[in-house]
Structures are given as C-alpha cells and as structure tokens.
Image (spheres, rainbow, N blue to C red):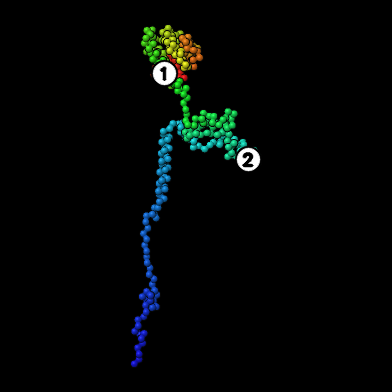
Amino acid sequence: MAEADPKADQKPEEGAEGAPEGEPVRPIIRKIIVEDGHGGAHGGAWKIALADMMTAMMAFFLLMWLLGATNEDKRKSVADYFRPASHSQINFGELAGSNGLFGGTSIIDPDGFPFSAKQTAMLERLTPQAQGGPNEKEGSSEQENNKDGPQQDPSSSARQEQDRENFQKLEKELKQKLQDNRQLQGMKDQVSITREKDGVRIEILDKADFAMFGLGNADMNSKAAALIREVAKSIKDMPNKVTVRGHTDSLGFTPDSLRNNWTLSTERADATRQILQGAGVNSNRFSRIEGVADTAPFVPNNPADPRNRRVSITVLNQ
C-alpha cells in the first residue's frame, strides 16, 4: 500500500490576520470622529469688536452731552484744544532752504515759531503771544501766576459789598424822603428805583397832569428840581460814578425846526446834571451825560405815553 502523504490532510496555513495563504491582507481602517465645538465657528474676536463699538458709543454720547451742557465760548475752547497748531504764524521766510543752500531754520526748530500758545487746561486757551518781546518774563503773566485758578481780588469783593450796602441805604433813604417831605409826597409814584447789572437806576417820570420840564424846552420846574436835589444829597458822599440820561416821547417838533428830540433829551440830561452838581455832587463823578430821544421808551406799546418823558440817574458799581 502506498503511504498517505502526511501533508494531504493538513489545512492550509492562514496569514497573520486569518486570511488564507495567497490572498491579499485587507487593512483594518479605524474611523475616529472628533466633534468640533462652537469655538471654531465663533471664537473670541466678537468680544473685541463689541468692546470697541461700546467704547465708541460711550465717547459719542459723552461728546453729545458736552455739546449740550456747555456754552458757545467753552465749545470754541474745546475745538481749539483739539485743533493742530496753526502754521499760518510760522515765519516761512526763514525756514530751511528758504535763504539758499543750508540757509534758514528747520520747520521743527522752536525758533521757527515766532508765536507760542500756552495752554493750562482743556477749556482754557490763551491768546498766542510773541516770543522774545521786550516785556516778556517767565511766569510774569497773570494766567501763569494763577495756575491754580482765577483768584478774586479782595479789594474788588470789598467794593461789591460796599456797593450793595450803599445801594440798599440809598433806596431806603429816597423812599423815606418821598414819604416825609410834603412837597415831594405827590411825586412818589413818579420815582422808580431799579437795581440792574450796572448799578442802581433812579428814574423820575412825567405823568399826564405833571411834567418836569416845560413843553419843548429844558427848564425844570421847582418840584422836580427839589426832588433832584434830594437825590444829590443821598449820593454826593458815595464814591461811585454817575450817569445821567434824558428821554422823550415820540411827539416831535415841526418839520421846519432845527431842534429835535435828540437835542431836547440831551439838554434835559445836562440840566439835571447841573442841578446835581449844584447840590454837591462833584463834577468828576459824572461818567456820561447823554440823550437818547424816544429810542428807549418806558412804555414800549405806547411811544406817546407821558411816562416816556423821563430822566434816568444811574449810580454805577465801583
């Protein structure tokens, strides 16, 4: 008997991956899925953009608030603060190269700017002043000496307080005189005492049945002259300057007359000045004597009203 082949019953050997010998080995593919987060799509750049936008909006609304809360002068000061220095004040005739090769000065040389603006605060810009002037001294300007802010002159404050006390006393004294003096009692309604920014104004008004001056002239009657003398007694010892102004109504002169309301109001103002000076008011106290005709009526709605004919005596602030 022929012997059986021992290899005949053996199974063919498999490869490393279990595949029969002679067949290609298939690779094992592993698919790993990584889920991306939201950071890849959005990131953090939007935060920077939002912060920039909010900063710009805050600056814009702050600017709008400043423009609404400041007056025109302060807005101009703010605009001047952010405005570049003007080159119109540079002496271009002496800049570099203007006087030939290597001639002149550099544009960034301080000597090339004959004017310099000194700035002490955002809302304060001083007028440019020429450098090297004959009277220039470092720290000599009032603004540089008062860097901590404007300082009020003590003597000015004292004068203001003195004016306030004197004006109160004057007003009280005149009202008392009009009440006590029988001759002047009928004129107390014709005297107007008003405090204004320039001082205290005393006005003596005409009325329908009483006039201080004659018709068309500057002759003052006795009652009006007595009242002016009482005013002079009250103000003659005060240090304040005095102005006198004459007013008329709208009734004019005849067309062929050389006189007019301007002439008449000026003559009446000077007649009042003469009585004040004769009653003790020093001549150097008078600051202005003027006539304004009918340009400043006491009753604007009725230019012909008798009360528009008046004399104003103003005791000015010191």
Task: Name the amino acid, label 1.
Answer: Glu
| x, y percent for residue 303 | 41, 16
What residue do we see at 37% from left, 12% from top?
A: 176
Q: Closer to the camera, 101 or 121? A: 121
Disc 1: CA contacts within 10 A as few (<14), some (14-19) or many (>=20): few
What residue do we see at 41% from left, 18% from top?
A: 165
Q: CA distance from mark 1 to mark 2?
A: 68 Å
Q: Circle 2 sits on which residue?
A: 97
What residue do we see at 34% from left, 84% from top?
A: 9
Q: Earlier in the sequence, mark 1 or mark 2?
A: 2
Q: Find residue 139 and report its image quarter.
A: top right
- What label does residue 165 carry, if any? 1
Q: Is residue 84 shown to the viewer in this render?
A: yes
Say left or right for 20 vs 317. left
Q: Is residue 102 above or below residue 73?
A: below
| x, y percent for residue 71 | 44, 31
Q: Is residue 251 shown to the viewer in this render?
A: no
| x, y percent for residue 43 | 40, 53
